[in-house]
Amino acid sequence: MAKITVTVNGKTHTSDVEDRTLLVHYLREHLNLTGTHIGCDTSQCGACVVVVNGKSVKSCTTLAARCDGASVTTIEGLSPDGQLHPLQEGFWECHGLQCGFCTPGMIMAATDLLAQTPNPTDDEIRHGLEGNLCRCTGYHNIVRAVQYAAAKMRGEQVSSPNA
Amino acid sequence: MIPAAFQYVKANSVAEALVLLQQHGEDAKLVAGGHSLLPAMKLRLSQPTVLIDIAAANDLKGIAVNGNTLSIGAGETYHAIASSAAVKRTCAIVADCVGQIGDIQVRNAGTIGGALAHADPAADLTAVFLALGGSVSVASASGTRQIAADDMFVAMLTTALDSGEIITTVHVPVIGAGQGASYAKLKHPASRYAIVGVAAMVSMSGGKITSARVAVTGAGPQAVRQTATEQALIGTDGGDAASKAAASKAGDDMDYLGDIHASEEYRRAMVKVYAARAISAAVAQARG
């Protein structure tokens, strides 16, 4: 067993976990943060993406024990006061999802993308989200949603494309 | 999926990792990015009883140019290498290659030393390392040694490393005037592993190719040099006709793996196509 102390969405947790516990299981089963999804479980689909120490990672392929001392942000941490994060608002406004299974991973990967590239081209968004698979919609509205969020995060005026 | 039980230990330096390797023997495995090892452990293809995590070992970090050699710490991640101004300036093929691996989450985790030590049949870096004629510095409890790229890959998932050894630094040549190096790959659309990847490096003088190294990954059990193609390039102007003629000899004398993603026959055909692309790009760069 490993004793780990991890700050998740600003709250510090100290837990005993099996050495083989994967971060995604720690988040979902120990902390009941089920917004992070398990999709392919082979680090290809990106449904499990969370941000660890500022970098996006696939939590199905990250050991919880390695995250001792780390700061983790999950989809639940994006709207601590109930106000939607610009990315969440963008996916809402631009209809960037159908079933929603891939959405938490898409949004967490997009936070990393926008932190590095605040004014991305559509190509840069597609390239930046290549580790996230959506099986419903195709990616067109997802790219629009990220552009919406990028504009809003740059302080620009945004309006709903459906308004 | 959850891996079989193991003991997790963190090593904060190469010295600590070497002590742990000695202590736990052949049942221990080193883990850095873990994106090859952990999936294999979930499938029970690998069942180490001890995992020694070297991702936080600071003495495996660092990127430095010394004369004609670019040296990259084995623990540098693909993302750090792809973003490095020094790598882009001195050996752009390496930055370009690692920038094409997997996706940003894989590149945030995976390391150059891990890729070479694991030697996945579909890894990208193995072909680039072979084409560049690089080397690795290796540490063990009994000292250090160098392994040349040509001696590194022994068989599928098998390298010249002994079980108590750690790659500490990867060395590749600085690409100088009159030289060019390029990597071209046909990628699997979900994993982005190489279905076929070809790396080529050429040196030119007076409009002629004076030396060439070409290596293929993805198509067979291990990355291999293509000596027939290399020989065919030397002395030519590297133009379209010469490049295509040399590329047509690629992949004739090697083992292949076929799977659901691409048959052996298809890979055999694609090796020639991607060899021509890699050679043409390397020649264009060498001509300046």
Image: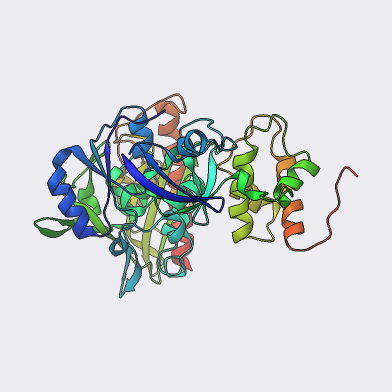
Q: How is the image coloured?
A: rainbow
Farthest-out residue, top = B260
The residue sitting at 43% across, 70% down in the picture is B86
Q: Answer whether residue B137 is visible to the viewer in this image.
A: no
Q: In the rendered image, is residue B55 in sight?
A: yes
Q: Residue at x 37, y 57 (%)?
A: B201
Q: Where is residue B260 shown, x and y percent of the image?
A: 45, 24
Q: Quadrant of residue B266?
A: top left
Q: Quadrant of the N terminus of chain A?
A: top left
Side of B27 relative to B251 (left or right): left
- Residue situated in front as seen by the camera: B155 or B271: B155
Quadrant in which the C terminus of chain A appears: top right
**Horizontally, is A42 left or right of B7 in the view?**
right
* Nearer-the-camera pick, B51 or A18: A18
Where A68 sits versus B67, above or below?
above
Q: Position of residue A65 (x, y in %)?
A: 37, 45
When asked about the image quadrant of residue B228, the answer is top left
Which residue is rendered at x = 54% and y = 30% of the image? A39
- In the image, residue A97 lies at what x, y percent? 72, 35
The location of residue B119, given as percent across then percent down, is: 30, 43
Choose between B137 and A152: the one closer to the eye. A152
Residue furthest to the left: B142
Q: Residue furthest bottom?
A: B67
